[in-house]
């Protein structure tokens, strides 16, 4: 892209959030906006509030009267997975519901992976 002299880059590549090489290649050469958190503050970011993404659905279930709520996270090494899990935990805490790690299962954002994670979760906690 640099050879083609593009005016800027919108980076939609969550797997690059920990890749320092991308920063070295782009830093100071071209405007970059990322849709995911990057380890370098030199780039702008436009993103959702991942804490709220975990908090709001959990709070909705609590408001509907549920007290035993499981969740399937994304990959644990991703910052957005961590923030969404924190939102889930915060919603539980705000309703005085104890966080139970056995109600959390890691997924991989794929349909098959989500299905497998749900099966593991229901095997551990059928209720």
Image (spheres, rainbow, N blue to C red):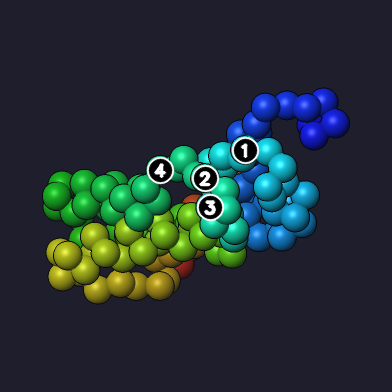
Q: Check disc 3: other Cα within 10 Å, few if <14, some if 14-19, many if 20+.
A: many
**Can you identify the residue that label 4 sits on?**
48
**Can you identify the residue that label 1 sits on?**
31
Work out whether residue 5 or residue 119 is closer to the camera in this orientation and state it.
Answer: 5
Q: Check disc 1: other Cα within 10 Å, few if <14, some if 14-19, many if 20+.
A: some
Q: Nearer the viewer, mark 4 or mark 2?
A: 2
Quadrant in which the N terminus is drawn? top right
Q: Which mark is residue 37?
A: 3
The CA span between labels 3 and 4 is 10 Å
Q: Check disc 2: other Cα within 10 Å, few if <14, some if 14-19, many if 20+.
A: some
Mark nearer the N terminus (4 vs 1): 1
Mark nearer the N terminus (3 vs 4): 3
Mark nearer the N terminus (1 vs 2): 1
Q: Residue 3 in the image: state x and y as whole percent.
A: 85, 31
Q: Residue 99 in the image: state x and y as whole percent.
A: 30, 72
Asked if 19 appears above or below 43 in the picture, the reply is below
The CA span between labels 1 and 2 is 9 Å
Q: Residue 42 in the image: state x and y as whole percent.
A: 57, 53
Q: Quadrant of residue 29?
A: top right
User: What residue lies at 75% left-to-right and 55% top-to-bottom?
Assistant: 24
Q: Is residue 20 left or right of residue 95?
A: right
Secondary structure under the numbered disc 2 in the rendered image: strand
Quadrant in which the C terminus is drawn? bottom left
**Can you identify the residue that label 2 sits on?**
44
Q: Nearer the viewer, mark 3 or mark 1?
A: 1
Q: Nearer the viewer, mark 2 or mark 3?
A: 2
Secondary structure under the numbered disc 1 in the rendered image: loop
User: What residue lies at 50% left-to-right and 45% top-to-bottom?
Assistant: 45
Secondary structure under the numbered disc 3 in the rendered image: loop
Secondary structure under the numbered disc 4 in the rendered image: loop
The CA span between labels 2 and 3 is 9 Å
User: What residue lies at 59% left-to-right and 64% top-to-bottom?
Assistant: 77
């Amino acid at each position: 892209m640099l050879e083609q002299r593009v005016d800027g880059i919108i980076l939609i590549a969550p797997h690059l959030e920990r890749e320092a090489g991308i920063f070295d290649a782009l830093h100071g050469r071209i405007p970059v906006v990322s849709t995911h958190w990057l380890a370098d503050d030199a780039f702008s970011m436009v993103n959702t509030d991942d804490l709220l993404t975990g908090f709001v659905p959990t709070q909705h279930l609590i408001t509907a009267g549920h007290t035993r709520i499981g969740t399937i996270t994304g990959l644990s090494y991703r910052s957005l997975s961590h923030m969404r899990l924190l939102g889930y935990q915060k919603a539980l805490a705000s309703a005085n519901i104890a966080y139970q790690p056995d109600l959390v299962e890691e997924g991989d954002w794929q349909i098959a992976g989500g299905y497998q994670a749900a099966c593991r979760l229901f095997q551990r906690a059928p209720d």
